[in-house]
């Protein structure tokens, strides 16, 4: 639904003129405070467009009502209520825009309790020609809402109802700030606020490379935050779960508990970390956006600075005080872990009664025998089930993909995903450039690029690989370092008779290729043994494809290869100022 005259979408606040009006959902409010004597402030945040994990993100707007006395401030209501902020003055500093009231512009702010806003089906009395007014509370002398404003409020409330739990969670985690807001964003993991930007000092635990433009850092400062993912110590795993094979299959070396945060780095930060950082380094991370993941766990992101696109927000920590504080926290954490282990060992291995020693040992041996027996039975069942499934389907048994429990998608279902068509909160339809999703599909390879296996790798210092100018120092460091990069053209394993096959181009980047081939990239023109091994690996995947490509057209044999299951990751890739849809191979391995 279009906004009333004079209203501006929250996302455009930074470029809006003074006197603009905004309509949004209240997502956070803090208690009134004084900036200085005789100036009371009511500070709150609104948002008008929502998607999963977006609450409190860049699409929100900080607003302030300024009055000389506290009792002149309005009652703001609670998160989930609707807010109309009219004729506001705007100020942008350090990429944050603030809308505040002024006497000169005759600013007005109104709060509409969500429980008093009717559903669209009952909106007729509030529309043009009706006489009903939605109850509101606001600044002194504010005018009643117009019919257009009331209809916009009703439809915005209906469009955002499904995000109310996330809004309330954000408001609860954000908490009420105390005193005057600080410019210093430095904080510990335990004090992270969802939706805010923070500076962190953290030790690198793990590094992953999802694609060419991003990387994931797992960092810790050894402080606990209950909103983080829980990494359980295998020594503390529940014995019953272990007996039934319910413990995690992924090896996490620590630290255990809720002390590690996953942070997604975008360019140019990802390249700097990739070239300069290793696990165990202590980093200073700026402008970490704390947010909720799809699994409702706290995570972080460092995006490209829109004002200074070349600014690097990651660097190694050199501050002596910060290094010392981190070492102190780490030592305290390790001491606590050792104390817990000693306590468990004492409880498990030293029975209180001497007569219980034999009984405890007997029970332990029985449990171990049962565990080994169940483990062996489970392995045999899984092996037989997999062999039977592969034999029935005619699928390549030498290529394995993760998440076998996920239903297979066809190439058409991936390319023409209905989720690409969506609606904004105002009801307007639009097409997304991509959907960030993973699929499991069964395909066969019909072509590849480049045409020669020797070109499946590229040197990091090659200017054709990095289009941006590269400093000589960095170019020298990257000299002799290689990464995998090639494309596979695939189509569905089964093509219905009388139809033209739908094809999908899969990008295989360095980390995906390492997982697929179990080989590191080298200069293939100077390593014939590695090239031969690559040829053998790819033959398993695509059969006689390369033989066909190198044969004269009249002598080409029919393509002979088996279809295989693989995981496809769809995401957006930055090209210039736009995001282009890309499909990459993921979590798939050619078995030896």
Image: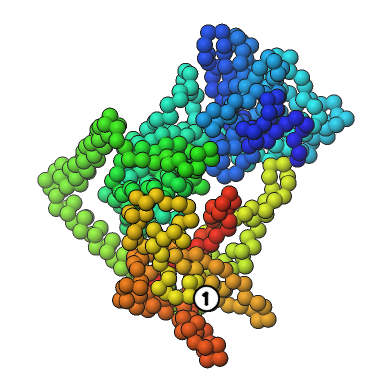
Q: Residue 472: where, in percent of width, then height?
A: 37, 51
Q: Quadrant of the N terminus?
A: top right
Relative side of 85 to 149, left or right: left
Q: Residue furthest right?
A: 129
Along the viewing direction, whichever of 297 and 533 lies nearer the viewer:
533
What residue appears at the point 62 percent right and 75 percent down from the top-left corner?
501
Evaluate whether residue 298 shows in this view.
Answer: no
Q: State how many labels appear.
A: 1
Tell me what residue is drawn at x 69 percent, y 48 percent: 423
Q: Quadrant of residue 319?
A: top left
- Estimate the x, y position of residue 136 in percent, counting from the top left: 71, 22
Q: Up-down: is 5 above or below 33?
A: below
Residue 295 position, x and y percent, is 49, 47
Vertical placement of 421 versus 341: above or below?
below
Q: Is residue 489 above or below residue 194?
A: below
**Which residue position is annotated with label 1?**
447
Image location (x, y in percent) of residue 426: 72, 41
What residue occupies the far front of the structure in this picture? 472
Q: Secondary structure at mark 1?
A: strand
Residue at 24% x, 63% y: name it. 369
Q: Is residue 13 visible?
A: yes
């Amino acid at each position: 639904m279009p906004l009333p005259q004079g209203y501006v979408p929250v996302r455009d606040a930074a470029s809006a003129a003074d006197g603009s009006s905004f309509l949004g959902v209240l997502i956070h409010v803090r208690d009134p405070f004084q900036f200085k004597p005789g100036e009371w402030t009511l500070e709150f945040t609104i948002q008008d467009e929502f998607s999963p994990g977006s609450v409190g993100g860049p699409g929100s707007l900080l607003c302030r009502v300024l009055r000389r006395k506290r009792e002149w401030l309005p009652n703001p209501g609670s998160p989930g209520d609707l807010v109309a902020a009219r004729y506001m003055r705007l100020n942008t500093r350090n990429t944050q825009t603030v809308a505040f009231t002024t006497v000169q512009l005759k600013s007005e702010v109104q709060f509409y309790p969500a429980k008093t806003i009717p559903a669209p089906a009952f909106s007729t009395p509030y529309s043009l020609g009706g006489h009903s007014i939605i109850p509101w509370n606001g600044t002194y002398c504010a005018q009643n809402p117009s019919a257009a404003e009331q209809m916009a409020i009703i439809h915005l409330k209906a469009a955002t109802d499904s995000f109310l739990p996330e809004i309330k969670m954000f408001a609860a985690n954000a908490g009420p700030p105390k005193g005057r807001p600080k410019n210093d964003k430095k904080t510990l993991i335990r004090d992270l606020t969802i939706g805010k930007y923070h500076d962190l000092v953290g030790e690198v635990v793990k590094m992953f490379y999802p694609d060419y433009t991003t990387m994931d850092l797992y960092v810790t400062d050894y402080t606990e935050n209950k909103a983080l993912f829980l990494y359980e110590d295998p020594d503390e795993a529940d014995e019953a779960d272990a007996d039934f094979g319910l413990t995690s299959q992924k090896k996490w070396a620590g630290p255990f508990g809720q002390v590690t945060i996953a942070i997604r780095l975008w360019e140019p930060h990802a390249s700097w970390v990739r070239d300069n950082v290793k696990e165990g380094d202590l980093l200073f991370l700026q402008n970490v956006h704390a947010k909720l993941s799809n699994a409702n766990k706290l995570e972080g992101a460092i995006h490209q600075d829109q004002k200074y696109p070349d600014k690097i927000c990651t660097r190694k920590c050199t501050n002596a005080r910060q290094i010392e504080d981190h070492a102190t926290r780490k030592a305290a954490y390790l001491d606590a872990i050792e104390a817990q282990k000693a306590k468990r060992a004492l409880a498990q291995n030293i029975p209180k009664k001497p007569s219980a020693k034999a009984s405890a040992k007997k029970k332990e041996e029985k449990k171990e025998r049962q565990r080994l027996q169940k483990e062996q039975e489970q392995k045999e069942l899984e092996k037989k089930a997999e062999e039977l499934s592969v034999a029935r389907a005619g699928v390549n048994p030498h290529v394995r993909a993760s998440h076998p429990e996920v239903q297979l998608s066809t190439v058409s279902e991936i390319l023409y995903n209905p989720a690409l068509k969506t609606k904004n909160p105002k009801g307007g339809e639009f097409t997304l450039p991509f959907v960030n999703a993973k699929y499991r599909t069964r395909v066969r390879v019909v072509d590849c690029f480049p045409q020669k296996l020797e070109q499946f790798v590229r040197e990091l210092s090659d200017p054709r690989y990095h289009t941006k100018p590269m400093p000589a120092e960095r170019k020298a460091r990257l000299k002799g370092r290689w990464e995998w990069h090639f494309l596979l053209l695939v189509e569905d394993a089964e093509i219905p008779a009388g139809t033209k096959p739908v094809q999908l181009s899969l990008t295989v980047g360095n980390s995906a290729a390492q997982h697929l081939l179990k080989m590191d990239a080298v200069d293939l023109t100077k390593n014939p043994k590695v090239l031969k091994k690559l040829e053998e690996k790819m033959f398993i995947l695509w059969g006689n494809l390369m033989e066909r490509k190198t044969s004269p057209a009249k002598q080409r044999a029919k393509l002979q290869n088996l279809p295989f299951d693989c995981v496809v990751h769809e995401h957006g890739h930055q090209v210039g100022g736009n995001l282009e849809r890309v499909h990459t191979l993921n979590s798939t391995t050619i078995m030896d």
